[in-house]
Amino acid sequence: MTEPVKSRPYRSSVRQEQARRTRLAILQAARRLFLEQGYAATTIAQIAADAGIAVDTVYASVGTKPVLMRLLVETAISGTDRAVPAEQRDYVRQVKAADAAERKIGIYASAVTEVNSRLAPLHLVLRDAAAQAPELAQIWAEIVSRRARNMRLFAQELAATGQLRPGLGIGEVADVVWSLNSAEYYILLVRDRGWAPERFARWLADTWCRLFLAADPDPATRRGPTGRWEHTSVIGENVQSD
């Protein structure tokens, strides 16, 4: 008796890879069109044409326009082709593992700068579209609320080190972090004023250290871009590291 023919394992892997590439093509097309012409003006048909696939494939692989926008935001945050919960992100684990507030700030400032290099333009598209598209208003509200909660968790991490300035509350720290690491602030300095992302990250870390951490007793030192104290010399109004 002839044994039944077994399906080859590689066929499943090939299909999965094809599905992944199709999904990635859809996301790339949607991002490009949303940024170029806005959310409202972009249609699923345009996204499908840009990705070189059928309209039905867009719906089957990813979903509707609101689902696409949410997925674009989530993948921009994670830096991968899928959404990653905050507690599973590498930089969050590194922040938690660091024992000094300066180190936590340096890690986080670098991370949010990298995230904003991907997220900030999409964030502004979502913000503006949510005011006109009811289907996006809930997504926008959820993202804003989640971001505020995450800023509070970061403020608690800093407070736990015992290195915050006396009288500085967690809520105030969270609000300041929330404002300075926003997509709007990143766009103002990096895109509009021409700052390099690396400069923005260094400045952000130094600013947070100055704002949040207890002062060093030696006036000839200051916290550098990594959060560490550096000996400085003052020339005019500029502080330069020796």
Image (tube, rainbow, N blue to C red):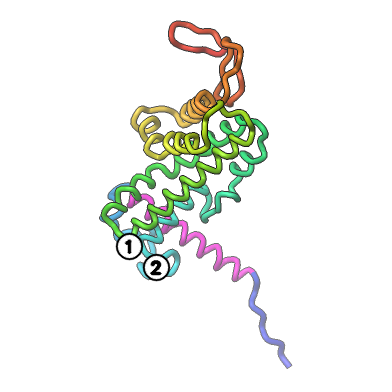
**Which residue is outermost to the bottom?**
1
Instruction: Choose the circle earlier in sequence order: 2 or 1.
Output: 1
Q: Amino acid at mark 1?
A: Ile
In which quarter of the view is residue 183 placed?
top left
Q: Amino acid at mark 2?
A: Tyr
Q: Secondary structure at mark 1?
A: helix
**Which residue is outermost to the top?**
236
Question: Residue visible at 26% across and 54% down?
Answer: 132
Given residues 220 and 188, the one toward you in this image is: 220
Q: Position of residue 143 (x, y in %)?
A: 43, 51
In the rendering, which numbered label is found on residue 44? 1
Q: Position of residue 59 (x, y in %)?
A: 39, 68
10 Å crowding of disc 1: few (<14), some (14-19), many (20+): some
Q: Secondary structure at mark 2?
A: helix
Question: Residue visible at 41% across and 59% down?
Answer: 26
Residue contact between numbered discs 2 and 1, judged by CB atoms under 8 Å = yes
Query: Does 123 sit left or right of 213 as displayed?
Result: left
Q: Position of residue 186 (x, y in %)?
A: 41, 35
